[in-house]
Amino acid sequence: LAQGVFSGHSHPCAPPCPASYASTMPIAEPDVEVPAGDVKKGAKLFKAKCAQCHTIEKGGNAKQGPPLWGIMGRQSGTYDGFAYSEANKNSGIIWSDKHMFEYLVNPKKYIPGTKMVFAGIKKDKERADLITFMAAQG
């Protein structure tokens, strides 16, 4: 299938898809409204939920996860020097507030096969705050 054809679950296999099929399908940007977020609350959430595995400052190093400075607008799986899963490299995601808003609910469901070991953030407002903070970092 051509890139851009995939949206939601209108592909030939019923979810969950076989990993071999899913890994070749770009994940389309979700059609969601991302609520306004609070940068200060997002900074606290990042420290509490993300900083154990990720840096966010410019020039930050890879830890257990890749650095997240400048993540918005970057293609998933492309930070040089980090060993991403094939699923992450092949997801076709260009990180946006909409992708991140849905991804952070349940990363392993959004990118089946990701190495990210994180249960997710269920509260919309917390995800919005976190995304606002991340976007403000560059």
Image (tube, rainbow, N blue to C red):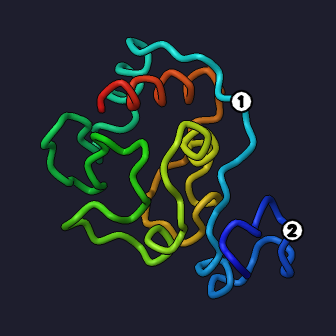
Q: Few, some or many C-alpha atoms within 10 Å of disc 2 (few <14, some 14-19, many ≥20)?
A: few
Q: Which mark is residue 33?
A: 1
Q: Which residue lies at the image location 36% right of the left edge and 38% below the top edge?
A: 50
Which quarter of the image is occupied by the N terminus? bottom right
Q: Which residue lies at the image location 45% right of the left edge and 78% below the top edge?
A: 86
Q: In this view, does 34 lie to the left or right of 42?
A: right
- Judge whether 114 appears above or below 44 on screen: below
Quickly name the residue at label 2.
Answer: 10
Element at label 1:
loop
Element at label 2:
loop
Tell me which numbered mark, 1 or 2, is placed earlier along the sequence. Answer: 2
Q: What residue type is labelled 1?
A: Glu
The residues bearing labels 1 and 2 have C-alpha atoms spaced at a distance of 21 Å
Q: Compare residues 39 and 107 and report the one nearer the observer.
A: 39
Question: Residue 14, percent across and down?
Answer: 86, 75
Q: Is residue 53 left or right of residue 101?
A: left
